[in-house]
Amino acid sequence: MFNEFKADLILGLEDRPAAAILKAMSYRNPNPKNLDRLKSALDDDWLGLNSGSFDLKYSAPEFLLALSKAAGLDIEKSRRRIEAIQQYLSDEEQAFKPYIWVESHFERKSQPIFALAACEPHRHLPFPKGFWQLALEVQLHKAKALARQHMAETEGTLVMWGRIQAYWLFHESPQSAHSVSSR
């Protein structure tokens, strides 16, 4: 749905110089910053709604509405599309982000705290955006593939932490863990 909106905008603006598009959006004398904003909005997967960009004329949603009008799109339909993108981005921001915890049964002996802190990220394997929306079975399948890949890349050992004993997928909260085999 989001790609369709972007495609509609690009099609509606086709063969028009950027300065003409900005003038149709009520920018009297488009400047380089306005041109950059237009380009970055059209190049961005989320049409600039996740960038926090604004100028003295438009917030990000207002900019897209004005752009929709300049492209000849239905304003109410564009408003609904913008709201849908904003809702998706909000859901993505607020959702628990699944990750794999790499377990090594590490016991601290003499390692300095700062070194442990610096190496801590190596024990968390993240997933791409939107992963949380996948069905649990799909998450488990992808988690197993990532665990196998990680085991091969590290040869079963994490610097500072020792030999890898297990992989745990945390998918809904820190309390919802599934063991993930790397075999």
Image (cartoon, grey):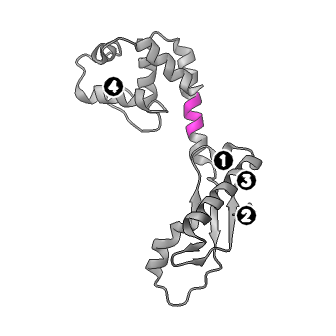
Distance between the Cα atoms at labels 4 and 3? 47 Å
Q: Secondary structure at mark 4?
A: loop
Q: Which residue is mark 2?
A: 181
Amino acid type at circle 3 is: Leu
Q: Quadrant of residue 107?
A: bottom right
- Badge 4: few (under 14), some or many (20 or more) residues near its Cα, within 10 Å? few
Give the mark nearest the N terminus, 4 or 1: 4
Figure check: 155 above or below 28: below
Q: Quadrant of residue 102?
A: bottom right
Residue 2 included in the magenta stretch of the image: no
Give the mark nearest the N terminus, 1 or 3: 1
Q: Which residues are magenta?
A: 84-89
Of the pair 107 and 174, the residue shown nearer to us: 107
- Badge 1: few (under 14), some or many (20 or more) residues near its Cα, within 10 Å? some
- Badge 3: few (under 14), some or many (20 or more) residues near its Cα, within 10 Å? some
Residue 70, percent from left and from top: 40, 12
Distance between the Cα atoms at labels 4 and 1? 36 Å
Q: Which residue is mark 4?
A: 57
Query: Which residue is pictured at 51% across the width and 79% down the height?
Result: 160
Residue 140, percent from left and from top: 73, 53
Q: Secondary structure at mark 1?
A: helix
4 vs 3, front mark: 3
Give the mark nearest the N terminus, 2 or 4: 4
Residue 180, percent from left and from top: 72, 62
Mark 2–mark 4 contact, CB under 8 Å?
no
Distance between the Cα atoms at labels 1 and 3? 11 Å
Give the mark nearest the N terminus, 2 or 3: 3
Mark 4–mark 1 contact, CB under 8 Å?
no
Amino acid type at circle 1 is: Trp
Q: Which residue is mark 3?
A: 140
Q: Quadrant of residue 85?
A: top right
Query: Which residue is pictured at 25% across the width and 21% down the height?
Result: 30
